[in-house]
Amino acid sequence: MGFIDRHPTAIRWILAGPLAFILTVLSLAALPHLLPVGRGGIDHLIYPTIFIPITWSVFIIWPVMTEKLTRCLAIYTGLTILSIAIVVFALI
């Protein structure tokens, strides 16, 4: 048995708590670089702000509801790395 199988409540708390908040902030920072600029020039900034409650709720509810915490942890890690890469490459 691995660490995740022995401590599922602690892993769920960490995934649904601080990691969900960090991933939400990172996705908020990365989305303006992925969305096209609208006619007014601010659509790529407004849409991430509107969608933040939805993404945050998904990032909180998914670890609590899932039975496969390793998959959730792997996807959270991948999304975190992808968001960081998007922000870093946008700043270069």
Image (cartoon, rainbow, N blue to C red):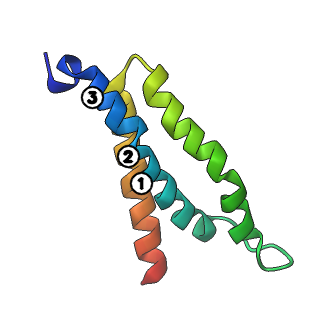
Q: Judging from the image, what secondary structure is the residue with disc 2 in?
A: helix
**What residue is drawn where x is 62% and y is 69%?**
32
Q: Judging from the image, what secondary structure is the residue with disc 3 in?
A: helix
Residue holding disc 1: 22
- How far apart are labels 1 and 2 at the CA level? 5 Å
**What residue is drawn where x is 81% and y is 73%?**
38
Mark toward the viewer: 3 or 2: 3
| Circles 1, 2 touching at the beta carbon (< 8 Å) | yes
Image position, residue 72 (x, y; %): 39, 32
Q: Quadrant of the N terminus?
A: top left
Q: Residues within 10 Å of mark 3 (few under 14, many from 20)?
A: few
- How far apart are labels 3 and 1 at the CA level? 17 Å
Image position, residue 46 (x, y; %): 73, 66
**What residue is drawn where x is 58% and y is 39%?**
57
Q: Answer left or right for 11 relative to 88.
A: left
| Circles 3, 2 touching at the beta carbon (< 8 Å) | no
| Amino acid type at image mark 2 | Leu
Residue holding disc 2: 19
Residue holding disc 3: 10
Q: Answer left or right for 35 relative to 65.
A: right
Q: Answer left or right for 34 relative to 11.
A: right
| Vertical placement of residue 24 versus 38, above or below | above
